[in-house]
């Protein structure tokens, strides 16, 4: 399975603001319970760099009378000009807040996978590629249900991933995620909480090239992503006819 790239940036100036990330509690420890404030369970995803990029559904076009959706998604850059970027540009932070943790605890399972199927598999519906899976046990040894517990997960994408026991180059694509929280007493029962979203983030490679100050009038910019539902407008240069 080879890595692949669905977007190409011909000219881009990226300014990354490096900043810290607040630490959050991972488990419910004895004596750490706080009064329930009535906060609703919520999940927040953020690139450590704070970078986002505009995403348009349906390739920016209305489909069956439904207008496209425009929103900001997380933007991670894995490589730039073939070199691995700084960790802040390729680290994803997931924060789950406001959950209740019964005794003896809960299991939090997060799965992040490519939005599109593996292009290296010759199939009409190739499976997605799982790029990150983490299972976290959140213990509760207090004897009572703990409220407003926060769980933080983070992952630094590297050159390779391991999927189904095989190591391969990390793919680039829009990514979707699914997060489930299950009761430690009944792990096979219906999840206590579940979250998920398509096109939650973009992990891409970038190439920065120097263009002439004045572009010849015989050239124009055009092109689009290889995936019809990608939603991005990729940059390509070609002579006009």
Image: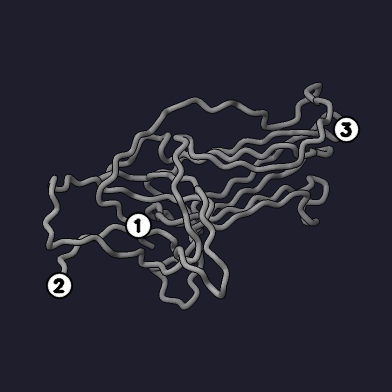
Q: Earlier in the sequence, mark 1 or mark 3?
A: 1
For the residue labelled by badge 1, is the local secondary structure a helix, a strand or a loop? loop
Q: Quadrant of the N terminus?
A: bottom left
Q: Marks 2 and 3, how far apart in space?
A: 73 Å
Locate residue 131, reporting x and y percent. 49, 52
| Residue ID at (40%, 49%) | 160
Question: Can you tell which quarter of the image residue 154 is in?
Answer: top right
Q: Give the residue pinned by disc 1.
A: 7
Can you say whether 151 is above or below 209 in the image? above
- Say left or right for 182 vs 207: right
Q: Give the residue pinned by disc 3.
A: 144
Locate residue 182, reporting x and y percent. 75, 49
| Residue ID at (42%, 28%) | 18
For discs 2 and 3, the disc positioned in front in the rendered view = 2
The disc placed on residue 241 is: 2
Q: Dot 3 surroundings within 10 Å: few (below 14), some, or many (20 or more)?
A: few
Q: Marks 2 and 1, how far apart in space?
A: 25 Å
Residue nearest the observer in this picture, 188 or 145? 145
- Say left or right for 101 vs 25: right
The residue lying furthest to the bottom in this view is: 124
Q: Dot 1 surroundings within 10 Å: few (below 14), some, or many (20 or more)?
A: many
Q: Does residue 4 appear in the picture of this structure?
A: no
For discs 2 and 1, the disc positioned in front in the rendered view = 2
For discs 1 and 3, the disc positioned in front in the rendered view = 1
């Amino acid at each position: 399975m080879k890595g692949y790239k669905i977007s190409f940036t011909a000219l881009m100036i990226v300014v990354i603001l490096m900043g810290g990330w607040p630490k959050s509690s991972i488990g419910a420890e004895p004596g750490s319970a706080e009064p329930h404030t009535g906060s609703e369970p919520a999940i927040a995803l953020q690139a450590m760099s704070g970078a986002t990029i505009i995403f348009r559904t349906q390739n920016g076009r209305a489909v069956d009378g439904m207008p496209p959706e425009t929103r900001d998604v997380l933007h991670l850059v894995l490589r730039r000009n073939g070199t691995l970027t700084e960790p802040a540009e390729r680290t994803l932070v997931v924060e789950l807040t406001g959950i209740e943790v019964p005794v003896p605890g809960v299991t939090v399972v997060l799965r992040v996978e490519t939005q599109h199927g593996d292009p290296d598999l010759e199939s009409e519906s190739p499976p997605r590629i799982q790029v990150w899976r983490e299972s976290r046990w959140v213990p509760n040894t207090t004897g009572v249900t703990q409220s407003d517990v926060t769980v933080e997960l983070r992952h630094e994408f590297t050159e390779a991933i391991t999927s189904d026991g095989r190591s391969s180059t990390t793919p680039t694509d829009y990514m979707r995620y699914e997060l489930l929280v299950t009761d430690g007493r009944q792990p096979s029962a219906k999840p206590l909480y579940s979250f998920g979203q398509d096109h939650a983030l973009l992990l891409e490679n970038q190439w920065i090239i120097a263009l002439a100050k004045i572009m010849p009038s015989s050239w124009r910019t055009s092109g689009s992503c290889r995936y019809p539902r990608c939603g991005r407008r990729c940059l390509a240069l070609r002579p006009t006819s």
